[in-house]
Amino acid sequence: MILSAICPHTGSPAANDHLKKQIQWLLFFRVLFLSLMLGISVLLQTKTPSIFLPPMHYLAYFIAGLYLFTIVSALVVRIIQCYSRFGYLQITLDTLLVTILVFSTGGSQSVFTVVYFFPIVMGAFMLFRRGSLLFATLSSLLFGALLLVEYGGFASRFLQTYPVQTSNYQTLLHSFTIYSLTFFLVAILSSMLSTRLQKTEAELFQTASDYDRLSFLYKQIFDDINTGIITVDDNNRITSFNRAAELITGYRPGEILGQEISRPFPGLETGLLQDERRHMSVLPRKTGETIPVGYSCSKLNTPDDSKNGYVYTLQDLSQIKKMEAQVQQAEKMATIGEMAAGIAHELRNPLAAISGAVQLLDREAQDSSINKRLFGIIMRESDRLDATIDEFLLFSKPVNPEKEWFPLGDLAREAMETLEQDPGWNPDLTIALEIPPDLDCWGDPQLLRQVILNLASNSANACRNMENGRILLRAEATTAKNKETQESAIVLEISDNGHGIPENLQERIFEPFFTTRETGTGLGLAIVSQIVHSHGGEISLRSSQPQGAIFSVSLPLP
């Protein structure tokens, strides 16, 4: 606000910089123009004087003062901020200097009267129409005052050798009128020219800005698009190579530009240029591996038809191929799962008939007969087979959790009470719960109950032959930062002090049908992993040395 009050014409930084440069040109042309004119006039006067000039020491003083004033102005222009007012001041002083020059060289008879055009033209180019008309008016007034001084006979008092003064009033009025009209004509023409030049410069600046913006936008699109783009000239030499193409091929632009495209990428067939369909090929990367790519090629038309080239667009199909293979594998597994589920249902019916028949035979057998023991084996294995079929059916069908809020401590306590009712449960096994009573979990209670049952059952089997076996269930709510968001989750840990899991087997424990127990089905941990992932959670194993294992289940909260 202070700067605006001091300098009301303060504009944008670009406008101020432009005005500063024009002032510097004004200072340069002032010295050059006046020095050349006076120097030429002095040289022409050495042989045959034809115009009136003041004594040489006066001219020397004038030129020295002009140089000194210009040097001071050039120093001041570096520190000022209001260039418009400084421009007005400089051109006003130039008009006064021209008036002094005209007065000193003959007044109405001076050949330097046309030098008034200099401040008028500079006013037009620096300050536009207002400046040109202002300095045309100032030049007319100063020239009129000069004529009045000459008409009154005062000029000879300053210079005794002053030329014959005109005493005719009409002649002086005629000179004033002609020069004044000429000044204003020059002002109007120069202002029109400066206005047109300003408009042209503005349009040129806008065009350059639009071009720079489009060029920057093109560069950003060319670099940021996830499709590889390679352009070649009419000799099939690579001319440009964007960032996506660099990521796909592994080559840097400096390593590939200028080469024929068939040398590093023989899979891109030039013979298909006229075919705009998308093609597939195997492209060698810099590392030596090959990747499947989809590409197309089209003609790159330029204004100069003799320098037309081609543009290739590439897309890495590696992930798409992997996804297709995964989808095919998932479809195959789904089909196999449906068939296996149907077979499991078919096995359950004859298994139930066998189990019923054996129970009837067992009632009629004597207690000491060998048949009694065989019937017991058949019943035990039938029950195990039936449990395997139940787990397999649970694993084969898709898991769609019905989530709700529930107290996790109550669910864990109920699951452990269910396990303790198992006839094979070790009564010496210690169970500890470290779950806050007010800790609520978000998920399907029935499915998460199955998770706790399976993990606790595995821990109990790991501690079966131990005197001081111990199972610990603990849970807590955690918050983790992920980029710009925070994710909350319930972390449930089930640990034991059993024999643990060997390190070479830890990566396979979640695979279906993988087990180290003779009576195990190998589906318990696979079912647990399936349920946890259906909730959007994660499960991991942290083995405790020298013995024991810790399973950690993380369930996200909404």
Image: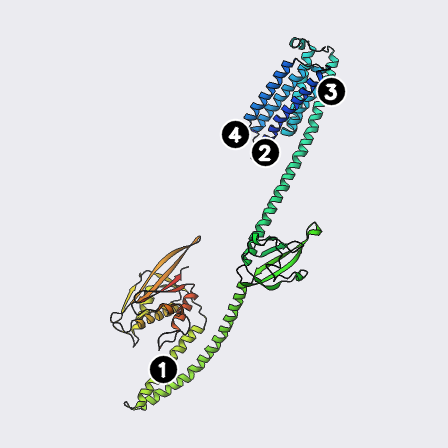
Q: In which quarter of the image is residue 421?
A: bottom left
First in residue order: circle 4 vs circle 2: 4
Using the image as rendered, state which of residue 53 and residue 463 is in the foreground.
53
Task: Check disc 2 and report the residue beneath it.
Answer: 15
Q: Tell me what residue is drawn at x 66 percent, y 17 percent.
A: 101
Mark 4 vs mark 2, CA separation in Å: 15 Å
For the C terminus, the quadrant is bottom left
**Which mark, residue 178?**
3
Q: In this view, does 470 lie above or below 131?
A: below
Q: Please tell me how crowded label 4 is: few (under 14), some (14-19), or many (20+) other residues with Cα within 10 Å.
A: few
Mark 3 vs mark 2, CA separation in Å: 36 Å
Q: Tell me what residue is drawn at x 32 percent, y 90 percent.
A: 371
Image coordinates for residue 374, horizontal then vertical, percent: 33, 87
From where the camera sits, is residue 110 visible?
no
What kind of residue is marked 1? Glu
**Which mark, residue 381?**
1
Mark 1 vs mark 2, CA separation in Å: 95 Å
Q: Which element is circle 4 on?
A: helix
First in residue order: circle 1 vs circle 4: 4
What kind of residue is marked 2? Ala
Q: Which element is circle 1 on?
A: helix
